[in-house]
């Protein structure tokens, strides 16, 4: 079966600090510390692994933080294609209490040299095979330009594989223009990138070079528009509340799991909805419990993602 | 000349995040990231090195964070006596902007096993020689008890060396009772530890087992009380404003540099005042510029710390 490679151009150690109360200007004792390898592509890879898919991951990693991420991924059974860099991989810190919204402190991440970008592209070209899917997800490091995303899409296509891009801002336009097979974004990201208000007017800006565009709309469900203009819609799974962090990445995993298995657009959207809902119901950000997938699928009258034996 | 060994029982990577504005509940882009090996003993060691003293450092280090600290210290020419531990060395995060006080997020740090405590004591006993000074500074990791501090003091004395302890809370009493040669604290710490309000009444609680007690009083200067009850006072260096972070540790470095060189109590207090003031005037927390020491010493009519050739 086709393998799914995720590319995370700007990975991070995602640190969560639980505190009694967030107060600016104080010394705050951290009650509990959690660290996980973070970045959208790595979140997608974890959910794909829970679904029993064959995955690989590819991200620039540097310094002790990079070593830690590589070791944690390996310990979790997630293969890493190494792309060593001179800079130190970044950290993001989420500060959470029971009273306020979490505060997220996001480091910019290390800039990659031209040689390091070339190395990342060479590793990608070497890792990807015909019929594989590549998922490029998340922000890009400082100094990265549209040419780097376009080169990833190109390297994937040369290998006979397909590529889904989940990013935002100008890179969303780059993805669509450079021939990504699937572009995934939420409604706000589409509006901001295209500077067009209504989805009906904004989406054709993204499909005109052949991309299928999946737009998530929160509780309003999602819409997928093919390059042929055919639109599929689905509702969200009802009565789901909990931890939304990482739910979008779980949805991306459901989507690409279906596409890599040759399922149709409607099924792919159902799997995305079901995986996203499963992530919301899980206390651990972005993790899913595969046992609840059939019940969630039944709520939208859809099919549950298949969970493969490994 | 006598060597000065600093012991940092609960070291940290001290991270400083500069942001435009601290707001609870928002996603905040970090504009600038600084990381330094942190913990009071390591701050003391850096200033001693700037003064040209022969130093050594000794701290439990674990995981990638521990490796990073060890490498940074070695790169800065500060010798490390390794005490490897299974846990991951902690991080502290200071979030600073131009509007509010900094927010400090302090991780508790890894607990040490009995074997790891035994190893730390063995490394200390092995590293320290007759006439050396040992500085034990900062908080202790979770699960540590007074017996660990008492054992460090004992190991130092068995080697014919002397020990200065800079800590707070119940451990301040432990230090005094276990025979530390010098105990350093600020006025508030002395009041909290002894539960006695006036310094005249509180200090004898700390000197009764032979400790000399140095109490810093901010802009009011400092007082040193010997076991014989003789009190020396000095004023603070006037007209100094800037970054107070790490100034107390710089003062400790000045103090122990003088004592290790056989200088008298009054000179030791002057060196402490001058080094502390130099740290306040430096943008980098706890760092000093040795060229300004004579001018600062002149302001209090005292002698400047000698800066030795290495």
Image: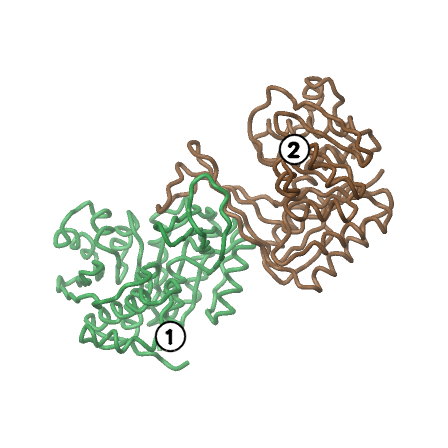
Chain colours: A green, B brown
Q: Quadrant of residue A126?
A: bottom left
Residue B300 screen position, x and y as percent: 70, 19
Return the chain for callout 1.
Answer: A
Question: What mark, if any, has residue A305 been given in the picture?
Answer: none
Residue drawn at x 39%, y 66% is A45
Give the structural element (helix, strand or loop) at label 1. loop
Q: How many residues crowd mark 2 within 10 Å: few (<14), some (14–19), many (20+)?
A: few
A199 or B249: nearer the eye?
B249
Residue A135 screen position, x and y as percent: 34, 63
| Residue that numbered label 2 is attached to | B198
| Residue that numbered label 1 is attached to | A53
B22 or B203: nearer the eye?
B203
Q: Quadrant of the N terminus of chain A?
A: bottom left
The answer to whether residue B230 is left or right of residue A217 is right
Residue B77 screen position, x and y as percent: 71, 42
Q: How far is the residue under mark 2 from the one under mark 1?
A: 69 Å
Of badges 2 and 1, nearer the viewer stands: 2
Work out whether A195 lies above or below B112.
Answer: above
Give the structural element (helix, strand or loop) at label 2. loop
The answer to whether residue B284 is left or right of residue A14 is right
The answer to whether residue A129 is left or right of residue A177 is right
B111 or B243: nearer the eye?
B111
Residue B264 screen position, x and y as percent: 82, 29
Q: Is residue B155 visible?
A: yes
A310 or B306: nearer the eye?
B306
Q: Quadrant of residue B193?
A: top right
Q: Is residue B42 visible?
A: no
Residue drawn at x 17%, y 66% is A235
Q: How many residues crowd mark 1 within 10 Å: few (<14), some (14–19), many (20+)?
A: many
Return the chain for callout 2.
Answer: B
């Amino acid at each position: 079966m086709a393998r799914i490679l995720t590319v995370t151009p700007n990975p991070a150690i995602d640190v969560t600090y639980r505190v009694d109360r967030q107060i600016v200007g104080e010394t705050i004792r951290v009650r509990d510390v959690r660290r996980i390898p973070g970045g959208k592509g790595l979140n997608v890879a974890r959910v794909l692994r829970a679904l029993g898919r064959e995955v690989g991951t590819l991200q620039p990693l540097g310094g002790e933080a990079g070593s830690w991420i590589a070791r944690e991924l390996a310990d979790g059974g997630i293969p890493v294609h190494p792309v060593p860099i001179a800079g130190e991989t970044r950290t993001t810190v989420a500060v959470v209490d029971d009273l306020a919204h979490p505060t997220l402190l996001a480091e910019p991440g290390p800039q990659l040299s031209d040689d390091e970008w070339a190395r990342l592209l060479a590793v990608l070209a070497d890792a990807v095979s015909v019929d594989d899917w590549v998922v490029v997800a998340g922000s890009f490091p400082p100094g990265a330009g549209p040419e780097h995303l376009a080169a990833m899409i190109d390297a994937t296509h040369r290998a006979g594989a397909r590529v889904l891009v989940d990013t935002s801002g100008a890179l969303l336009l780059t993805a669509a223009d450079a021939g990504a097979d699937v572009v995934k974004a939420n409604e706000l990201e589409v509006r901001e990138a295209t500077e067009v208000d209504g989805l009906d007017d904004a989406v054709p800006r993204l499909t005109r070079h052949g991309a299928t565009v999946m737009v998530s709309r929160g509780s309003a469900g999602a819409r997928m528009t093919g390059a042929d203009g055919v639109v599929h819609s689905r509702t969200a799974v009802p009565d789901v509340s909990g931890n939304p962090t990482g739910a979008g990445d779980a949805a991306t995993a459901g989507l690409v799991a279906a596409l890599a298995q040759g399922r149709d657009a409607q099924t792919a959207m159902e799997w995305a909805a079901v995986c996203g809902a499963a992530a919301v119901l899980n206390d651990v950000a972005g993790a899913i419990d595969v046992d609840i997938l059939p019940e969630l699928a039944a709520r939208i009258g859809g099919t549950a993602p298949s969970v493969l034996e490994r």
